[in-house]
């Protein structure tokens, strides 16, 4: 694709995604509060799955745990995808894991950069964050109605504010090159669709857990502090069949929910 690094050519994007789940469902908004909010509103209105909302700038981007997501205008890939898998709401974690693997593969394939997946939904280069994922759901009783997967990739930022410079990086900083956000977006959506279909197949979750562990140094052998059950320290011991992190302590193996981990060490 010949699209400039700092812009999106919708015709080229549509052509590159022809025949995919996302064909004819792309929504580009130059500036918005949050692409996840747009996608959640679309889901609540009954819009079918596969619609994609992306922007050059978010003024109220959200991360996990109520944190904000900062992005320099026109430098990051900021996208939210509406999906309607027929699963229970309690199984929504695998959507974040699926997106993490998809983003890992897209960045590696497009930019040649190997990222490390920090369970459940951050991609790091070294110890610095390059991509964050926020999955939000709507459910009725125990059944999931729809899910929105928001993915933010730091692509062409040349620097970060001092308060986050030690923990954030971009693909440009790591490679010294400007990258096409359009090409990365296509790779990301193609990879996400592939992972989505795999996860929906029989035994797809088990295969997904294995792929997560293969791209994450955090899944095993990392010292970690867990806030649950009064707080305790342990060592990560892989993922269970549902994608939850296992932590080994002197008392045995525990399973940790997303948000229960305060920090990894070692």
Image (cartoon, rainbow, N blue to C red):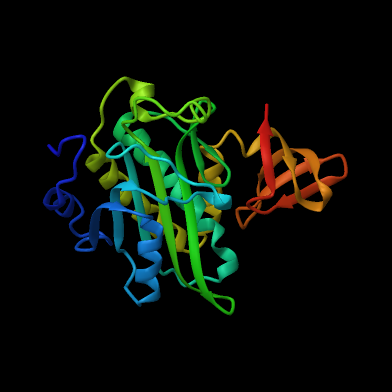
Residue 82 visible in the snapshot: no
**Residue 236 drawn above or below residue 203:** above
**Residue 113 drawn above or below residue 197:** above
Instruction: Please state the horizontal and vertical placement of residue 117, each as a whole percent of the image.
Output: 52, 38
Instruction: Please state the horizontal and vertical placement of residue 194, each as a whole percent of the image.
Output: 36, 53
Query: Is residue 38 found left or right of 218 in the rendered image?
Result: left
Total numbered labels placed on residues in the image? 0
**Residue 209 drawn above or below residue 122:** below
Q: Give the residue displayed 77% in from the left and 38% down from the top.
A: 234
Rendering quarter of residue 109: top left
**Residue 235 drawn above or below residue 12:** above
Quadrant where the image shows the C terminus: top right
Q: Give the residue displayed 14% in from the left and 47% down from the top.
A: 9
Residue 170 visible in the snapshot: yes
Tell which of 14 and 69 is nearer to you.
Answer: 69
> Quick one: which residue is furthest to the right in this view?
251
Query: Is residue 149 found left or right of 16 in the rendered image?
Result: right
Query: Is residue 4 found left or right of 67 in the rendered image?
Result: left
Instruction: Please state the horizontal and vertical placement of residue 201, each as a whole percent of the image.
Output: 45, 63
Instruction: Please state the horizontal and vertical placement of residue 131, each as a whole percent of the image.
Output: 44, 39
Rendering quarter of residue 107: top left
Q: Give the residue displayed 70% in from the left and 41% down from the top.
A: 237
> Quick one: which residue is furthest to the top in this view?
176
Tell which of 33 and 83 is nearer to you.
Answer: 33
Query: Is residue 237 found left or right of 202 in the rendered image?
Result: right
Quadrant where the image shows the N terminus: top left
């Amino acid at each position: 694709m010949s699209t400039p690094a700092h812009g999106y050519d919708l015709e080229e994007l549509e052509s590159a995604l022809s025949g995919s789940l996302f064909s004819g469902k792309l929504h580009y908004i130059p500036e918005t509060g949050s692409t996840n909010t747009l996608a959640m509103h679309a889901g609540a209105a009954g819009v079918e799955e596969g619609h994609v909302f992306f922007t050059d700038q978010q003024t109220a981007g959200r991360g996990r745990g109520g944190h904000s997501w900062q992005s320099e205008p026109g430098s990051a890939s900021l996208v939210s995808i509406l999906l309607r898998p027929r699963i229970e709401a309690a199984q929504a974690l695998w959507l974040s894991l699926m997106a993490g693997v998809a983003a890992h593969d897209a960045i590696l394939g497009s930019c040649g950069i190997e990222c490390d997946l920090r369970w459940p939904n951050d991609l790091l280069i070294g110890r610095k964050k390059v991509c964050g994922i926020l999955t939000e759901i709507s459910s009725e009783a125990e059944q999931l109605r729809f899910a929105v997967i928001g993915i933010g990739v730091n692509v062409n930022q040349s620097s970060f504010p001092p308060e986050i410079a030690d923990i954030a990086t971009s693909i440009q900083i790591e490679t010294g090159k400007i990258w096409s956000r359009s090409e990365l977006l296509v790779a990301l959506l193609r990879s996400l669709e592939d992972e989505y279909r795999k996860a929906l197949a029989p035994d797809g979750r088990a295969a997904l857990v294995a792929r997560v562990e293969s791209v994450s140094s955090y899944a095993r052998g990392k010292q970690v502090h867990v806030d649950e059950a009064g707080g305790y320290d342990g060592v990560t011991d892989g993922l269970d069949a549902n994608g939850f992190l296992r932590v080994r302590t002197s008392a045995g193996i525990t399973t940790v929910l997303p948000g229960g981990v305060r920090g990894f060490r070692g």
